[in-house]
Image: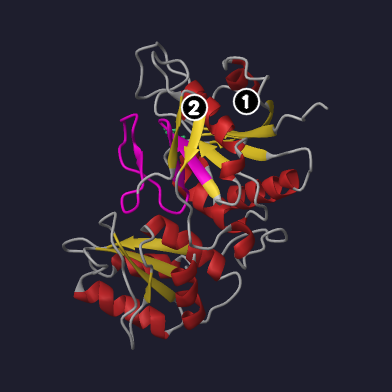
């Protein structure tokens, strides 16, 4: 009896993994989002003995050009693809700048246990020792692995496997840019062998209340940074732009200047949902009742923003949103 090989679909969105420089030595200042998914897959060694691979071009952009509307369209497309019994997993090629944000969005809204793996590269496809093809083949292997099912969205970079919830880009240039500062990687890929050692307890994918199939846009949520001398200007600007929620990326355990704090509390009184997070890159922010903002737990400000955007699609109840920050 012949056993059907897993079928992995590679959805390409652009980034450095599809980037083109002027010479093999150019690793900064190249053009992201140049090569097509067909060209990227054509660079890989033959793995047809272990996995069937097909490609689809979603967009071809630097990841800083993506918008929340692209997130919705991407997630809607992935949910349709994963409902096809012939597709066993998805790999999303993506620029590394905002890869962790798209990954966490998909982690919360994909309606399937099948693996969704995001991958990028730190060196463009034309560079000497580019990391793109090895990262891509590793991501395909993870997406085809039975062990990767039910883990939510994963990120594969530099031979390591991370949870979308915890991973962040920690260097503008190094090949080992991706880390999970508080918890570490879930596993690795070595000599083509996928090894996953830990599972996430927080809810994701089928365990969330977020259904985006009918959504055309997400509520506006902005991030305001705390720093020495920060006043109320940024808070007032995002409120004027129509923010329904604000994430404070505060100093230390989520602090801001007295005038910034006063303006945020006034915004909260008028119904804006405010989340307290830290710009430090690690550690937990916990609720401190009775009159505090929502606490982000250990989500980074950029991921707290995504959870708040999605939370606002189902509720404006602050107790309910605080509960979500403890669950997701
Ligand atoms: C991008 O995010 O599109 C450019 C940077 C990268 O992919 O590494």
Outermost residue toward the top in this view = 23
Residue 57: horizontal and vertical position, in percent?
Answer: 66, 31
Q: Residue 57: in sight, yes or no?
A: no
Q: Quadrant of residue 229?
A: bottom left
**255 sits to left or right of 25:** left
Q: Residues within 10 Å of mark 1 (few under 14, many from 20)?
A: many
- Dominant secondary structure (helix, strand or loop) of the stretch shown in magenta: loop
Label placed on residue 289: none
Q: Is residue 323 above or below residue 160?
A: below
Magenta-drawn stretch contains 162 = yes
Q: Residue 328: in sight, yes or no?
A: yes
Residue 4: horizontal and vertical position, in percent?
Answer: 77, 30
Residue drawn 31% across and 69% down? 285
Secondary structure at numbered mark 1: helix
Residue drawn 44% across and 22% down? 124
Numbered range of the magenta stretch: 154-183
Q: Is residue 79 above or below residue 5?
A: below
Label placed on residue 17: 2
Instruction: Name the N-terminal-most of marks 2 and 1.
Output: 2
The residue that label 1 is drawn on is 37
Magenta-drawn stretch contains 76 = no
Cα separation between marks 2 and 1? 10 Å
């Amino acid at each position: 009896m012949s056993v059907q090989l897993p079928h992995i679909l590679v959805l390409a969105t652009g980034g450095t993994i599809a980037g083109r420089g002027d010479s093999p030595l150019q690793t900064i200042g190249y053009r992201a989002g140049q090569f097509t998914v067909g060209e990227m897959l054509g660079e890989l060694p033959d793995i047809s003995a272990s996995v069937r691979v097909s490609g689809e071009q979603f967009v071809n952009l630097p990841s800083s050009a993506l918008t929340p509307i692209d997130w919705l369209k991407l997630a809607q497309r992935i949910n349709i693809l994963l409902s096809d019994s012939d597709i066993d997993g998805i790999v999303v090629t993506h620029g590394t700048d905002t890869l962790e944000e798209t990954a966490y969005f998909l982690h919360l809204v994909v309606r399937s246990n099948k693996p969704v793996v995001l991958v990028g590269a730190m060196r463009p496809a034309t560079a000497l020792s580019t990391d793109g093809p090895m990262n891509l083949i590793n991501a395909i292997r993870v997406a085809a692995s039975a062990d990767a099912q039910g883990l939510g969205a994963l990120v594969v970079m530099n031979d390591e496997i991370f949870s979308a919830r915890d991973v962040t880009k920690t260097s503008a240039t190094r090949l080992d840019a991706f880390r999970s500062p508080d918890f570490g990687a879930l596993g690795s890929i070595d000599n083509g062998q996928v090894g996953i050692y830990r599972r996430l307890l927080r809810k994701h994918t089928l365990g969330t209340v977020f259904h985006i199939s009918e959504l055309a846009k997400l509520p506006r949520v902005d991030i305001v940074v705390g720093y020495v001398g920060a006043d109320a200007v940024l808070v007032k600007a995002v409120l004027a732009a129509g923010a329904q929620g604000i994430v404070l990326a505060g100093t230390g355990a989520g602090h801001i200047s007295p005038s910034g704090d006063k303006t945020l509390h006034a915004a909260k009184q008028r119904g804006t949902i405010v989340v307290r997070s830290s710009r430090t890159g690690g550690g937990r922010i916990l609720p401190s009742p009775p009159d505090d903002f929502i606490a982000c737990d250990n989500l980074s400000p950029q991921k707290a923003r995504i959870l708040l955007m999605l939370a606002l699609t189902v509720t404006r109840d602050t107790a309910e949103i605080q509960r979500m920050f403890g669950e997701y």
